[in-house]
Amino acid sequence: MVVTATLSPPLPAVERPWAPKLRDTPMLWEIARAVGGGPFHVIHPATFAENLGSLLDALAAEHTPGTVYYGKKANKAAAWLRECTRPGAGVDVASVPELVHALGNGVRGEAIGVTGAAKSDGLLWLALRHHCLLAVDAADELERVSSLARDLGETAEVLLRVRPPTAPASRFGFAPDVLTAAVRRCADPGTAVALRGFSFHLDGYDPIPRAELAAHLIALCRDARALGHPASKISIGGGIAVSYVDSEDWRRFEADRHDGWFHGGRNPVRTYPYHQEPTGAAMVTAILRHDVGGAPLSHRLRDAGIELLLEPGRALVDGAGFSAFPVLGRKASGDHLVTTVAGLSMSLSEQWKGSEFLPDPILVPADRAPADDTPVRTAVVGSSCLEYDVLTWRAVQLPRCPGVGDLIVYPNTAGYQMDKNESGFHQLPLPPKVVVDRDRWHVDTDYPIQEIR
């Protein structure tokens, strides 16, 4: 079967060397057979460790004391958590199961930050018992934290979350007048609260607003210290940028994009910026070197004796995983194919935000000597009864016609794609996460079950 069309230009993913190397070995097919013919995710904790090390090195290079908390919501795997037990690292959680998962994988409570709005009493209770750092979002939550801490005979370690001036309508964080009252409330006798500093979260990926708002939080810490608070930490949240494709491919794609490239004309209105600069550690460096009030932010932090906290998610799992879907069949659809794979688009979460995961999927043929190697264009759809269960609306080019048993691999999916919207629809099992460690692999498990070496 040959289907040809003049559709979108290629948008190949930028990958770490381990991923294409693994796809070219028998191990990939060993995993595919072992999981029983369904979709699966492959994760690579060594890459997570490299990403974490680069962020810690960026802080150290600017002589900035800090802690990197992994934003756990980006990916549920346990394997990442075991990398967060190193000095300078921790985990950011927002629910009881996330907190229990981190504790169960060896992360000490003192290295866990608890964020999110309107936390349950159960989450607050467990966090206080383990001396976690609590980002308090509202005045009523501050009162609940204080009451629970008194009942437990503990002192709550808290940051007050600041509402960004650029987002006055945000439902998160303290407005300026309420923040002033909260700082004073923390100083009242008997509150059982130690105000350790302030936090914020900004949308977007621009380093400059983060540096400038961080400078404002430094001033807040100084004012809090004048009231007797031990305020010496500020958290600038997550939003550390990632690039999935190179600059020229992204520029060409965005310049020419139109509805005709997409199955059914479904061209997403908004997508993640799949190429951006600076990213990762370079973005952290840009934040720290930005001039705020006549000096780089890093100097301002050091002069004030303040530790910088980061909460990256996507940036830590960048390049650390891919997702594989076995091909079930194909059919012609106008000027392109529609290829059906085992599994659901819920396991490629961007699709469920009215958007599209744009880096090109990769065909890994089961037959290494195909009879026909004519390139084809195809959309990729899930195996459910839903018309909108589509993994790739864009008609992408594959080097040959996909056959039953081949694998369609989506590169670099560890950040939010694998499990954010996963579902057991049709009673299909959730795709397992398979941990790859050099020439060995095992299925990710919630808690350590092997002897610690």
Image (tube, rainbow, N blue to C red):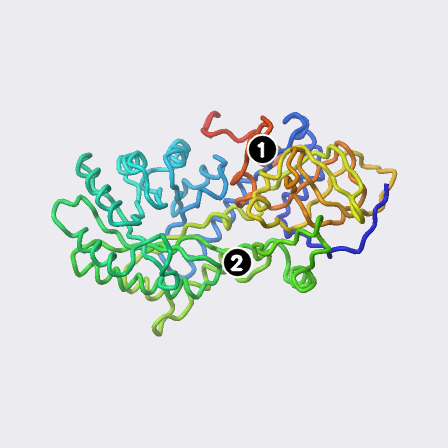
**Distance between the alpha carbons at the discs numbered 2 and 1:** 27 Å
The residue drawn where x is 63% and y is 55% is 245
The amino acid marked with disc number 1 is Val
Q: Which residue is mark 1?
A: 434
In the image: residue 421, left or right of residue 300:
right
Furthest toward the bottom, the residue is 294
Q: Nearer the viewer, residue 137 or 217?
A: 137
Q: Which residue is mark 2?
A: 279
x and y, in percent, of residue 162 in the image: 32, 56
Q: Judge whether 237 appears above or below 391 on screen.
A: below
Q: Judge whether 353 appears above or below 246 on screen.
A: above
x and y, in percent, of residue 376 in the image: 80, 47
x and y, in percent, of residue 247 in the image: 63, 62
x and y, in percent, of residue 16 in the image: 62, 48
Q: Which mark is residue 36?
A: none
In the image: residue 273, left or right of residue 11:
left
Furthest toward the right, the residue is 371
Q: Residues within 10 Å of mark 2 (few under 14, many from 20)?
A: many
The secondary structure type at the circle numbered 1 is strand
Q: Judge whether 325 appears above or below 183 on screen.
A: above
The amino acid marked with disc number 2 is Thr
The secondary structure type at the circle numbered 2 is loop
